[in-house]
Structure formats: C-alpha cells, structure tokens
Image: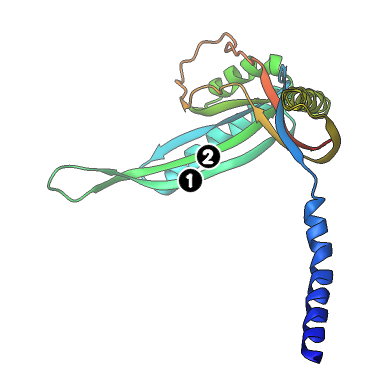
C-alpha cells in the first residue's frame, strides 16, 4: 500500500520542479525587431595621396643612388608646399632586378628598379592640385591614388544615428499597427557604421612633362551611414 503513495509523491515533486520552467517559458515576451539606416553626406576636408619615384640603373647601387637623389628633391618640394614632417610617411620601398625575356632563352638580367613611395596627408584640400604639380615637377613619376576623408566625423555620425533610429521606429510602428499591437519598451539596440569615400583617382604613373598649371581635383562628398537594429517588446 506504500508504493502508490511514494509514486504519487514522486510525480508531484516532478511537477513542482518543472512548473517554474514551464511558467517561465509561458512568460517569454513577444518581440519585434527592425533595422533602420541613417545617412548624411559631408564634403571631405582632408586628403591622402601616395606619391614617389621609380628609378632604374644598371646595378642596384646605381638605381638606389638615383632614387635617393630624386626622393630628397621630392621631400624638399613637399616641405616647400607647407606639408609637415608628421604628414609624410614611407609606405613602400622596393628593390628588384629587371630581366629581358626572350623566347627559348634564359632570362637576361638588364638592370635594377628601385621604387620609394610616401603617403602624404594634405590638410587643405584647396592646395591639393598645386601640391600634385609640385611633386611631379620635383621628379615624382608615381602617384598611386588619392583618397578623401572627413577629419571629424563624430557629429555627422551622431546625426546619422538619430536618422537610423527614426527609420527603424517608423517601420516598427507600421508593422505593429498592421498586426493590431503596440510597441513596448526597447529590449536591445546594436549598430554598424560605414564610410563611403569618393572614388579615388585612378592609379598610374605620372608623365614628367606634366603641365605647370595646378592639377584639377574634385573632392566630391563622403557618405557616412549608420545601420541600427532595435528590438521592442510587443504589448
């Protein structure tokens, strides 16, 4: 007669243990999650240009000597253009042999190439065209692209954040109204930030007989955008 009593007690204990979990599952909130995007456009106020010199010689030493002389002239031109030392940084230096390839013959060593490039930060975009002209006249025969940037994007990104939040909230209200519910408190927010700079100038070598007039440069606008994901509880 004791066994049924013990069995009933065991079942009751199991239900008592499981009931909090079942109750917790039953109380899990209903949610709605939407993403929004905010975008602002600003004219960039800083530019980056990579420029340098490619020199050739019969020996590595000859090529290096020629390159060093040309780079010293380039550094002098940048300083004369008002570029601070902190805004000039070596970005690439290369020494490599140059071969003549002919069919059915072993490659013939004909000389050496030395390439030295620096990345220059131009803090006055209005001066960029004149600076490009100066470096070419100083001996630069390599310009490997120009990039633009907004130097202080914080305020613009904050504006984009507000627009992204408004966009997500607007869409969430539309869905809530369509389903006959209302939005409750916000449960989570996450964001992603992206920058879309203007298209840089094409890469390529610069001809030494460039015109003396300043190079025309168009900075365009930079797009700063924020993506936000927001989750609301549904009432």
Q: Residue at x 56, y 22 (%)?
A: 199
Closer-to-camera residue (16/70): 16
Q: Quadrant of the C terminus?
A: top right
- Does residue 10 appear left or right of residue 125 in this picture? right
- The residue most toward the left is 104
Residue 197 visible? The answer is yes
The correct choice, above or below, for 94 with respect to 83 in the image is: below
User: SS at mark 2?
Assistant: strand
* Disc number placed over residue 94 in the picture, else none: 1
User: SS at mark 1?
Assistant: strand
Q: Quadrant of residue 42?
A: top right
Q: Quadrant of residue 200?
A: top right
Percent of width and height locating residue 52: 54, 33
- The residue most toward the right is 185
Q: Residue at x 55, y 37 (%)?
A: 117
Percent of width and height locating residue 60: 42, 48
* Disc number placed over residue 222 in the picture, else none: none
Closer-to-camera residue (29/166): 29
Q: Residue at x 61, y 41 (%)?
A: 90
Contact (Cβ within 8 Å) of mark 1 with mark 2: yes
Q: Quadrant of the N terminus?
A: bottom right
- Does residue 53 appear left or right of residue 45 in this picture? left
- Does residue 115 appear left or right of residue 216 in this picture? left
* Label 1 environment density (alpha carbons within 10 Å; few <14, some 14–19, many ≥20): few
- Does residue 206 appear left or right of residue 232 in this picture? left
* Disc number placed over residue 116 in the picture, else none: 2
Marks 1 and 2, the one that precedes in the sequence: 1
Percent of width and height locating residue 158: 82, 27
The correct choice, above or below, for 163 with respect to 112 in the image is: above
């Amino acid at each position: 007669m004791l066994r049924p009593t013990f069995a009933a007690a065991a079942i009751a204990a199991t239900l008592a243990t499981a009931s909090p979990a079942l109750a917790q599952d039953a109380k899990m909130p209903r949610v709605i999650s939407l993403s929004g995007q905010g975008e602002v456009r600003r004219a960039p106020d800083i530019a980056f240009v990579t420029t340098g010199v490619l020199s050739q010689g019969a020996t590595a030493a000859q090529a290096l000597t020629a390159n060093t002389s040309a780079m010293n002239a380039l550094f002098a031109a940048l300083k004369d253009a008002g570029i601070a030392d902190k805004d000039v940084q070596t970005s690439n230096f290369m020494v490599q042999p140059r071969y003549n390839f002919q069919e059915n013959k072993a490659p013939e060593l004909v000389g050496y190439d030395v390439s030295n490039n620096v990345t220059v930060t131009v803090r006055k975009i209005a001066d960029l065209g004149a600076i490009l002209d100066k470096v070419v006249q100083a001996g630069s025969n390599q310009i490997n692209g120009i990039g633009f940037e907004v130097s202080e994007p914080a305020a613009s990104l904050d504006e984009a954040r507000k627009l992204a939040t408004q966009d997500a909230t607007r869409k969430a209200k539309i869905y809530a109204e369509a389903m006959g519910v209302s939005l409750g408190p916000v449960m989570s927010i996450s964001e992603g930030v992206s920058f879309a700079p203007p298209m840089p100038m094409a890469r390529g070598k610069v001809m030494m007989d460039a015109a003396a007039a300043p190079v025309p440069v168009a900075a365009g606008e930079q797009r700063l955008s924020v993506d936000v994901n927001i989750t609301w509880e549904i009432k």
